Amino acid sequence: MPTHQEPALRTTGLRKTFGHHVAVDDIDLVVPAGSFYGLVGPNGAGKTTTLAMAVGLLRPDAGRAEIFGVDVWRDTVQAKQLIGVLPDGNAMPERLTGREVLTYLGLLRGLDPDVVAERTDELLQVLELDSAERTLVIEYSTGMRKKIGLAIALLHAPRLLVLDEPFEAVDPVSAATIKAILRRFAGNGGSVIISSHVMALVEQVCDHVGVISDGRVVAAGPLAEVRGAGTLEDAFVDLVGAHTAGSEGLAWLTP
Amino acid sequence: MAHSLTPTPAPAALARHMIRMRLALMRNSLRGDNATNLYAGVAFGLLLAVGTIAVAVLWPAYLPLTLAVWLSGWVFGPIFIGGGSEALRPEYFTMLPAPPGRIAAALLAGAFAGPVPAVNLVALLSLPVYGWRFGPAGVLIGLVAAVTTLVTMVMISRVIVALIGLFVRSRATATAVGVVTGTAIALCSNGWAPVAALGGTDTSAWFEVLFRVLPSGWGVAAIEGPWPLALAILAAGAGVIALLLAVWSSLLSRRVASAARGGVPARRGAPRPFPRTGGARVTAAKELRAWWRDLVRIQLLAVAFSFAIVMPVLLLAIGVWGMVPFAGLIAIVMAAAASANLYGSDGTALWLTLMTPGAERSDVRGRQLAWLLVVGPAAALLTLAGTLVSGQDWAWPWVLGLFPALLGGGAGLVVLLAVTSLVPGTDPHKRGGNPLSTGADETAETSLAWLVLIAVPSVALPTAGAILLDPWAGVATGLLTGVLSVWGLGAIACRRLEKRGIELLNLMKYGPAPEADKPTTADLPLVHRIGVTVCYTLAWLPLFPQGLVPMVMKIFGAGDPVWFLALHLPPVWQWPTIIFMIALGMLMYGYAILVPMRLSSSSTVEGGGTGRA
C-alpha cells in the first residue's frame, strides 16, 4: 500500500540501450515525497529517456521504477492513477480544441462531468488558454502546447508530477504562472520532478537536484549539498567535466 | 560598409548544390526496406521503359497511348501518395538570398536527380527509336523531344503537388482531390467499358488526335510532322516549360509564405460541447471530430465513396447493371482500406491513452464505433438506392447478407490491423506544407491498404456461401459474422494495445529498431524483391478484369467478350480459365503480401528505438 513514507519515485538500476548506444546506464534515483526535484544534465545525457522509463512510457532493458512504492511496470494501472505527466514533444488529440482535450481526457478517466467542466474552466483560465477557445491543438504555438500539456498533467489532481522541460519555449509571464502553480502544488504536499538545463531556474524552484551525464547519476541530493559553496551552474560544469568552448575560432564572425 | 554581404549564389552553382543534396538524402535513406523498395522499383520501372521502346518498334501506332500512360503516372502519382514525397522541401530554402524563380529552377534540377526521371528518360528514348522510321532528322527531333517531354512531365507533376499544397485548405478542396483520385482508380479498373461502348478496338481518329494533343504526344507529332511544324512544336514545348516554371515558382513562394499547418479546415463558431459520457462513447465523440476536421481523412473517404459510385456506373456504358446494387458494399471495403492506419496517422498522441488507466479498451471500441457511424449510414444509403434504382431484385439477399458482414468485418479489421501492422508517420503537428501527406512510408501504407482490401471480403466469404444455400440463412449469417467480427477482432486489438502499446508508441517516436540479427525485407534475395514488386503491380490484372469481371459477365450472360481472354475461348474452357485467373491473382497477392510480412513483422514491432537520449 502506498504511504507517505515511500519516496515519490525510486528507480533501481534503470537501463536502456538504443542499438550500440547506452542511453541510460544503471540509474538509481530517489525522489523524496513532497520534494521539488530538478533533474539536470547536458543535451543527450538521458534525462528524457530516464523519465519516460520512470513513468511507464518506455520499457527499460533492466531495472525497476516505483511510484510511492507502486511498481510502474507491474501495477501499471495503480501507478498511472498517482502521476501526471508532461512528456517532451509528443502529439496530442490534435483535432480538438484545448477545452475539448481536457474534457475528453477527464471523461475518459471517469471523472464526474461537472468536476471535469469546472476544472477545465479553471485550468484554461489560469494558464491563459481560454482566449483560444476555437483553436485546435494542432494550431497551437510551442508555448501553448506546453501549457495545455501541463493542464492535462494537472487535471486529475495527481500526487506526483513528472514534467519534461516544462519551461522550454514558454514566455516569462506564463513561466511565472507555471512556477507559482507548481510551488503551490508542492506546498500542499505534492511532489514534482522537472527536467531542465536552465540552472538558474532549477536553483530557484527546486529543493533537490540530480545531475545526469552520459546516462549515469553523477550527483544527487538536497540542492545545498550538490551545489556546495558556489552556484549550481559552476557545480554542474565541474561535475560533467566539460570545458566551456566558444572563446576560440569563429574569427570571421564580425558584423 | 565594413564587411561584404553574403553573395547571391549563381544559378548553376545553386542547381548543382541542390542535385548534390538530393543525392546525399537518397544515399542516406538507402537502408533496409527503403533500399529494397528502390531497387525493386527501379528494376520494374526499367522493365516498363524497355517495354515502351518495344512498343515503338513493334506496335508504333500505340506509342502515343503508351506515353500518355507515363504522363498519367506523373499526374496521378503525387495525388495517390498523398501529395507526393518531396525530398527537397521548398521550406528549407526560404532564407536563401535569391529570387524565387532561381530557387524554383534549382529545385527543379534537384527533382531530376532521382531514379524516377532517369527511368522515364529511358522510356522516352522510344521517341528517337520511333523517329528512325523517318530518317536521321526523325532521330534528332526524337532526342530533343525526349528531353523536353521529360521536363514537361516532371514540371506538371510539381505544379500539381504545389497546387495541392496551396489550395487544399478546406473540406471542399480535399473532397475534390479525393473524388478525382477515386474516379481515376475506377477508370483504371473499369475504364475499358466506355471505351468498348464507343467502338472498342476501332481506334478511331479522335483517339489518335487526343493522344497527340496531350503533352506526352507532342514528341510523336513533331517527329511525324514536316520540318517547320516539328520546330514549332518543339518551340511550343519549350514555351510551356517556361510557363510551368513561372507558375511553379510563384506557387512556391506563396506556399512558403502561407503558414497553414496540418490541413485544418476553417471553422466558424465555438464547437459543440462534448457529450457528458465516458468510456468508448467519449472516444467515439473525439474520433468523429477528427473525421470531420482532418483533411487527410476527408480526402480518403472521398476516394472510397467516389470509387464505389463511379466503378459500377462505368459498366452502364455496356448495359451491365449488375454492379450497381453493390456500390455500398464496395464503399465499405474501400473505406476500410482507407482507414487501415488509424493509430499511425494520429502519431504519438497514443501516449495519452497509455497514461490513462484502462483507456486502451475505450480507445479501440470508440474508434470502432466512430468508424461505423462514419461509414455505415452512407454505405447503407448507397446500397439501398443502388439496389432499388438498378431494379436488380435478385441482388437483395446478397446485399442484405453481405452488408452487415462487410461492415462488421471492416470495423473489426480496421482496429486490429491498426495495432498489429502500424505504419509510423510524422506527428501531425510536425508535418510540412503539404496538407495531404502524413509523412508515412507510402509503400508500407499501400500494402496495408491492399491487405485490408483482401481481408475484409474474406470475412464475408462464409456469408456468401450461406446465401448460395439459402438467402435467409445468408442474412442471418451476415449479421452474426458482422457482430462477431466487431466484437472479436476488436477484443484482440484491445489486448494487443494493452500488451504492446508502449512498443507501438516508441515505434512512432523513434522509428523501427534495426537489429543486426533480425531479418528485414532487404535480406530477401533480389529475385524475391523483384517478384514481390511485379506481383503487387500486376496481380489485379488476372484477379479483376480477367477473373472476377468475366465471371460476373458469364453469370449474367451480358456484354461482348472485348478483351476478356476466357470469353474468347470455347465454352468448355471458359470456367476453368476464369477460376485459374482468379486463383493466379490471389496467389500473386498472397505472395507479394506474405513474403515481406513474415520477415518484417518480426523485426518492426519488437524493438525500442534507434537512438535518442
Image (cartoon, rainbow, N blue to C red):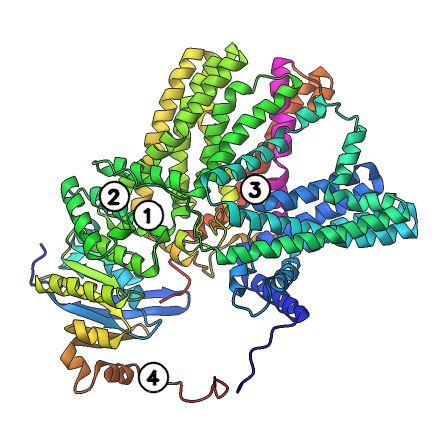
Q: Amino acid at mark 3?
A: Ala
State how many labels appear: 4
Q: Position of residue B591 (x, y in %)?
A: 56, 40
- Evaluate if marks 2 and 4 touch, with contact meaning CB atoms under 8 Å apart: no
Task: State the separation of the CA atoms marked 2 and 4.
Answer: 46 Å
Instruction: Using the image as rendered, state which of residue A89 and residue B153 is in the foreground.
Output: B153
Q: Which residue is mark 1?
A: A93
Crowding near the residue tagged with mark 3, few <14, some 14–19, many ≥20 C-alpha atoms within 10 Å: many
Whichever of callouts 1 and 2 sits on the residue coming sooner in the sequence is 1
Residue B532 lies in magenta, yes or no? yes
Judged from this view, the residue extending furthest toward the right is B135
Q: Amino acid at mark 1?
A: Pro
Instruction: Using the image as rendered, state which of residue B185 and residue B1 is in the foreground.
Output: B1
Residue occupying the point 61% across, 42% down: B76
User: What element does badge 2 sit on?
Assistant: helix
Q: Which residue is mark 2?
A: A104
The chain that hosts pointer 3 is B
Q: Amino acid at mark 4?
A: Ala
- Evaluate if marks 3 and 4 touch, with contact meaning CB atoms under 8 Å apart: no
Left or right: residue B484 versus residue B173 is left
Q: Position of residue B202 (x, y in %)?
A: 79, 25
Vertical relation: B61 (above or below) B196: below
Looking at the rendering, which quadrant does residue A23 occupy?
bottom left
Q: Which residue is mark 4?
A: A242
Left or right: residue A108 versus residue B389 is left
Q: Position of residue B505 (x, y in %)?
A: 35, 52
Q: Which residue is mark 3?
A: B592
Residue occupying the point 65% across, 48% down: B156
